[in-house]
Every structure is written in C-alpha cells, then in structure tokens.
Amino acid sequence: MNSPPLKYGLLAGMVYFCCMAVAHYFGIKQPLLFVYYDTPFYAYQDKIISFAVVSYIALFYSAAQHRAVVPLQMHWHPCLTKDSPPRPTGYKLG
C-alpha cells in the first residue's frame, strides 16, 4: 500500500492525464493541457495523442494502487534509466 501523499499525488497525475486526453480529443486548446497550444495541428494528430495518453492514465492508476509499480512508473522510459544505451546524436538531414 502506498503512503497517502504518494497515492494522492499519483491519482492527481492520473486526473491531469485524463484532462489532457479529453482536451486533445475534443481540440480544447488550453496551455496546461497542450505543450504547444499555439501551433497549427491536424485533428487526427490530437486523436492519436488522446489515445496514447491512456497508457499514462493506466500507469499512474496502477502505481497509485500497487506500490510495486511505482519504480516502473517513475522510470518507464528507456532513455531515463541508468542502464539504457546512449541516445544517438548528430543526425545529418542532407
């Protein structure tokens, strides 16, 4: 069982991502819910983002319910772990 501050913090993150998914699905341009809210976009891009955010919602919810998931939630991205290979840099486009 998680401590109450951790549990409620993770649930608050889940609520934030729910709001983000709804905003992207319906095209509601709010600065906190869109990273680049003032750029032109295609509707299909926002639909894809709204469905991709569901994985964040599930991860935050499961971490709030089960303490064993918290380390996975905190280091979910392979580029953020200490054992991950270095990211390539210096791409040439031409």
Image (cartoon, helix red, strand yellow):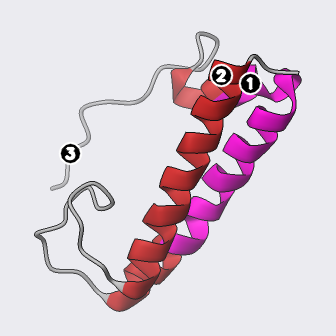
Residue located at (56% from left, 53% from top): 15
Q: Look at the image and give the residue range highlighted in magenta.
A: 50-73
Check residue 70 in the rendering and tell me which mark sits there, or answer none: 1
Q: Is residue 10 above or below residue 52?
A: above
Going from N to C along the chain, the mark reached first, 3 or 2, is: 2
Report the Cα–Cα distance between label 1 and label 3.
38 Å
Q: Measured from the top left, where is residue 7 in percent x and y?
A: 70, 29
Report the Cα–Cα distance between label 1 and label 2.
9 Å
Task: Give the labeled residue for mark 3.
Answer: 92
Task: Give the labeled residue for mark 2.
Answer: 6
Q: Is residue 13 above or below residue 16?
A: above
Q: Amino acid at mark 1?
A: Val
Residue located at (59% from left, 72% from top): 51
Depth check, mark 1 against mark 3: the one in front is 1
- Other residues around mark 2 within 10 Å, as few (<14) / some (14–19) / many (≥20): some
Q: Decide which of 58, 4 is in the foreground and name it.
A: 4
Q: Decide which of 75, 91 is in the foreground and name it.
A: 75
Check residue 49 in the rendering and tell me which mark sits there, or answer none: none
Q: Amino acid at mark 2?
A: Leu
Query: Is residue 33 left or right of 18 when viewed as pictured?
Result: left
Q: Are marks 1 and 2 in contact (CB under 8 Å)?
A: yes
